[in-house]
Image: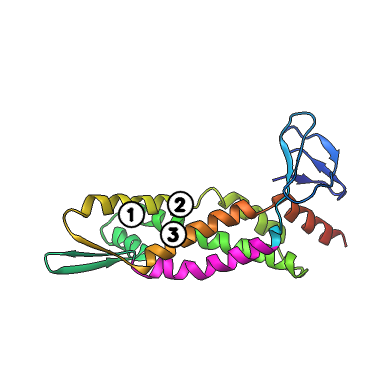
Amino acid sequence: MDKITDTEHLIACNECDLLLERPVILDSQKAKCPRCGSTLISARHNSIERTLALSIAGMILIFPANLFPLLTLELMGRTQSQTIFSSAMGFYYDGLWPLAVLVFMFTILVPACKLLLLFWVSFSLQFSIRLPARRFALRSYQHLDEWGMLEVYLVGVLVSVIKLVSMATLVPGIGIFCLGALILVTTMSSSMLDTDLFWHKIAEADHD
């Protein structure tokens, strides 16, 4: 994240720590450090509004993505459906509790926390409401942003489909479509998040 000093008109490069007067840039423009060339600010159009909308969409999608069946397997007259949550519980009941914990944390808990934190900060900035712990929420989101593993889980599901398609009938469930939409929404929310703008808005509000 960009380091904003107590003086809201100054900004420090997060690569070389050069202290500069905060540049004024327009949407979709970038400001680079004159010393090291790293990006100081990369403005994104309507970042707060879009981030808020995407976080709400993600919180809606996370429930069907985790609770509805991803796939239904039909083999020799037997049918079995699997959800993300049931797969984590299946590992637990099979004695593979470390794997169950990993699946639960990185496919359910971390994505849910990321969306909730993003909603908390963007909602407070959009409506100018001083919700508590906004700095902590944004900092926590940035730390957790690297730990969402929904894409890895989806790749694992697709690999399983390729291996099983010749042996059984696989029927995609609503969960897999919601999971794909959730991955798209979380990826877009990360790309739409203008961290510099968020930190600057928080600093401005705290100094009022």
Task: State the residue position of label 3.
Answer: 180
Q: Specify few, some or many for label 2: CA neighbours under 10 Å numbering under 14, 14-19, or 20 or more.
A: some
Task: State the residue position of label 1.
Answer: 157
Amino acid on which disc 3 is placed: Gly
**SS of the residue at dot 3?**
helix
Task: State the residue position of label 2.
Answer: 149
Labels 2 and 1: the sequence-earlier one = 2
Tell me if residue 55 is in the magenta stretch.
Answer: yes
* Image side of residue 175 versus residue 24, left or right: left
The residue range painted magenta reads: 49-69
**SS of the residue at dot 1?**
helix
Tell me if residue 12 is in the magenta stretch.
Answer: no
Residue 30: x percent and y percent? 74, 42
Q: Nearest to the eye among marks 1 and 3: give it.
A: 3
Amino acid on which disc 2 is placed: Met
The image quarter in which residue 54 lies = bottom right
Q: Specify few, some or many for label 3: CA neighbours under 10 Å numbering under 14, 14-19, or 20 or more.
A: some
For the question of whether residue 110 can be seen, the reply is: no
Q: Nearest to the eye among marks 2 and 3: give it.
A: 3
Disc 2 versus disc 3: distance between alpha carbons? 13 Å
| Between 104 and 190, the one nearer to me in the picture | 190
Labels 1 and 3 touching (C-beta < 8 A): no
Q: Residue at x 59, y 57 (%)?
A: 189
| Between 42 and 114, the one nearer to me in the picture | 42
Labels 2 and 1 touching (C-beta < 8 A): no
For the question of whether residue 60 can be seen, the reply is: yes
Q: Nearest to the eye among marks 2 and 1: give it.
A: 1
The image quarter in which residue 11 lies = top right
Is the C terminus in the top left, top right, bottom left or bottom right quadrant? bottom right
